[in-house]
Image (cartoon, rainbow, N blue to C red):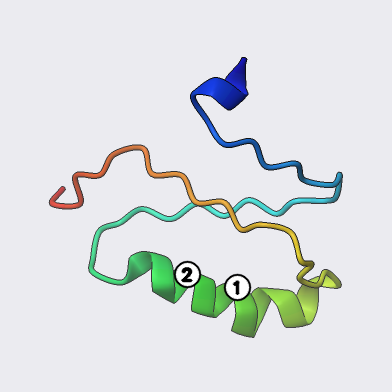
Amino acid sequence: MFGERFDVLLVEASAWAVFTTIEKRANETQDTWARIYSEWFPTSGYEMTDGPEILWYESYDFSK
């Protein structure tokens, strides 16, 4: 069913961290990733895996 219209990516079960950023200025997403790596990871007890990073944009209109 999905394979006809979409690519399917199987991802092993794991813990996920979800971060929200509001694009109010240029490079907001990049700055958020930098803070995740430099501030959150070192103190969280979590570490990166080989799994995917998933970004979701509610809108592609970044002029707001």
The kind of secondary structure element at disc 1 is: helix
Q: Residue furthest front?
A: 4
Please name whichever residue, 23 or 12, is drawn nearer the observer in this view of the structure. 12
Q: Give the vertical position of 23 relative to 37 (above or below).
A: above
Q: Is residue 63 left or right of 54 when viewed as pictured?
A: left
The residue sitting at 20% across, 51% down in the picture is: 62
Please name whichever residue, 57 or 24, is drawn nearer the observer in this view of the structure. 57
Q: Residue furthest left?
A: 63
Q: Hey, what amino acid is under mark 1?
A: Ile
Distance in Å between CA atoms under marks 2 and 1: 6 Å
The residue sitting at 57% across, 36% down in the picture is: 7
Q: Give the vertical position of 32 relative to 7 (above or below).
A: below
**x, y percentage for residue 42?**
75, 82
How many labels were placed on the picture? 2
The residue sitting at 63% across, 51% down in the picture is: 18
Please name whichever residue, 34 or 3, is drawn nearer the observer in this view of the structure. 3
The residue sitting at 51% across, 79% down in the picture is: 34
Q: Residue furthest top?
A: 1
The kind of secondary structure element at disc 2 is: helix
Q: Is residue 14 left or right of 3 when viewed as pictured?
A: right
**x, y percentage for residue 43?**
77, 78
**Quarter of the image where one finds residue 59:** top left
Mark number, residue 61? none
Q: Hey, what amino acid is under mark 2?
A: Thr
Q: Which residue is mark 2?
A: 32
**x, y percentage for residue 11?**
77, 45
Q: Which residue is mark 1?
A: 36
Disc 2 crowd, CA 10 A, few/some/many (<14, 14-19, 20+): some
For the N terminus, the quadrant is top right
Tag 2 and tag 1, C-beta contact below 8 Å: yes
Q: Give the vertical position of 10 relative to 34 (above or below).
A: above
